[in-house]
Amino acid sequence: MSDATPMPASAWRRRFLTPIARQRTAMVGLAILAVYVVGALLAPWIASHDPTAQDLMAALQGPSAQHWLGTDSFGQDLYSRLLYGARLALVIGFASVALGLVVGVAIGLAAGLIGGRTEWLLMRITDGLLAFPELILAMAFMAVLGLGTENLVYALALSFVGPFARMTRSDVLQVKSQPYIEAARLMGVPTAAVIWRHVLPNVVSPILVQGGMRVSIAILLESGLSFLGIGVVPPTPDWGLMIAEGRAFITMAPWISGVPGLALAILLVALNLVGDGLRDAFDPSTQRE
Amino acid sequence: MERQTVFTLLDVERTYELGKAGWFGKSRGRLKALDGVRLELRRGDSLALVGESGSGKSTLVRIMLGLEPASDGRVLYGQHDLGQLDPAARKRFAREVAFIYQNARGSMNPRLRIADILAEPIRLHRLRPEAEMTGRVAELLARVGLPAEMAERFPNELSGGQIRRVAIARALAAEPQVIMADESVAGLDVSVQAQVLNLLRDLCREGGITLVFITHDLGVASYLCERIAVLYLGRIVEQGPTGAILGNPRHPYTRGLMQAFPKFGAPLTAPLKGEIPSPVNLPQGCRFAGRCPEARDACRETDPVLAEQAGRQVACHFPLEVAQ
Ligand SMILES: Nc1ncnc2c1ncn2[C@@H]1O[C@H](COP(=O)(O)OP(=O)(O)OP(=O)(O)O)[C@@H](O)[C@H]1O
Ligand SMILES: [Mg+2]
């Protein structure tokens, strides 16, 4: 979603770039995130091996010139799997949040704008979704949908619909009661334009901030589900799977779980830094009035 | 020639149910914010609404704008009931009547630049071609004494006085026939206030605009408006030509307000003894009797109606003598 009004470059810079750039820790997080993104994008070129190529002769090897980060029990190259795993984690994280955001925001907008019975019904559905913790909800959906990357995205997205819907609705209700909405109506601005020009731009930034913060939750959930064996299917290069796989060899080959575990931890920290920075930069409650 | 009627209010009442939350909430009583208001506004009129805080000035204006329904009575715009305008007439009403909010900052979308805020009514009613928009915005800003660079700013980058002037500029942008303003010059510097008042005065005197102006400054009221209506607890107690009324108040409440007059900028309060009765629990008889230095027994028994008295209307059993 973009801001509804076209803005000249200078205003854009003042409203979006400068506030973010002012958040030092967010910039650190963004830099780390950039490394992951580049690694994920360039995976086909910078990976040294096929991530799913097994070589049982070379299983359980420590880091070496041949296998920079060692190999797992099937002899798959950990460095290559790590790169492709980053790709998968980022794709699943962003895709599931984007999907959950679109559906949740649509529900929240409809509920907040239409009101009445529609609102009641939509909010009861949302309450139903919100009654379960995200992990439990995603697990339940995976059990219904079956394993696989695509299904994992749907399951995670579904677990995010509730929070986005509720948040959007409350923001819409709050904005709807502002005098500038009444003023616009009084001037005769048609309803569609009131929503597009006056309501949406005022609810969009907290939603995007929430979205940014949820990407890290999505990646954590994704790895968790795969770790539990109800996420993506082996031998897909996935960090959760890799950690689970290395568990049995944790004493003799700690790098098998350690490498993806560390990669995951650093990515989550970076995403949280970015999320906090976004919030501080754009959340109206922390902004000067 | 009789000038055209713009607004007619026939015994308008507005009651608020207090403390009712949800379906099962118990009502803590009904508050009469407006109680039997009769008013007629003709084209070119300028009317000042004065009264203490809570007397119902904003409520009256909001009802005339159709922002709130009247609980009882009728509001006519031209010949038609305000609540039953067809879509075309609604649209015309939206263009012809502009409102300047008491809370100017709150009435502007914080995500729009001033240029877009001012252009909105122009684009909406297709008053100017897009090519002339920048020029028109600059012109509007200049009329309220703001530099053209302000157009690039966002509302939260403007001071309180500047944002009030933008609110006035936005009302002018629609090229309306009626302007209603709620405390629009309060808190402005004296020089800026004078500029804005002169602008509004010119619009009325030369532009033929109809103005309803809420103010707590009787000096502003007498400078700007030819007519004045004094509100007390939701009722008009005295109404007529500003000069005559402020020169010779006939309602004791108007006189009380005038004794408070020289206080600059502070909310208007009549320096009278006695409590203002709660609007939830109005006394029998005249609602002003408890504070009125002239009150007699009859005042505590029957509620006086607004009656025509020598060119003005007064709601008092024993109006003050006209000093000669
Ligand atoms: N939404 C509402 N619910 C309940 N009571 C209300 C509501 N709006 C206004 N009132 C009451 O109606 C009365 C008149 O309010 P109004 O805002 O018209 O006063 P005012 O003359 O504009 O005062 P001020 O000079 O302070 O702006 C007040 O007693 C107020 O408390
Ligand atoms: Mg008011």
Image (tube, grey):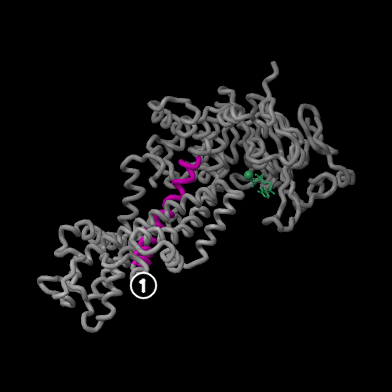
Q: How far across and how far down the image is residue B318, in percent?
A: 85, 38
In the rendered structure, the answer to whether residue A202 lies left or right of residue B288 reads: left
**Is B81 rendered above or below residue B184?**
above
- Count of number-bearing discs: 1
Q: Position of residue B97 (x, y in %)?
A: 59, 31
Is residue B58 visible in the rendered structure shown here?
yes
In the image, residue B41 lies in the stretch drawn in magenta: no
Q: Quadrant of residue A219?
A: bottom left
* B177 versus B147 height, above or below: above
User: CB at mark 1 closer than 8 A to ligand 1?
Assistant: no
Q: Which is the main secondary structure of the residues drawn in magenta? A: helix
Mark 1, residue position? A228
Which residue lies at the image location 79% right of the left edge and 35% below the top edge?
B314
Q: Position of residue A204 (x, y in %)?
A: 43, 50
In this rendered view, identify the residue nearer to me: B167 or B92: B92
| Residue B135 drawn at (x, y percent) | 39, 28
**Residue A287 visible in image:** no
**Residue in front for this viewpoint, B294 or A51:** A51
Q: Is residue A136 left or right of residue A15?
A: right
Where does the magenta region start and end? A194-222
Residue A182: name its quadrant.
Answer: top right
Taking the spot 57% from the left edge, 33% from the top edge, the residue there is: B98
Question: Which quadrant holds the C terminus of chain B?
Answer: top right
Q: Secondary structure at mark 1?
A: loop
On screen, A118 above or below B2?
below
Judging depth in this view, the residue of B82 and B189 nearest the camera is: B82
User: Circle 1: is it few (<14), some (14-19), or many (20+) Cα within 10 Å?
Assistant: few
* Amino acid type at image mark 1: Leu
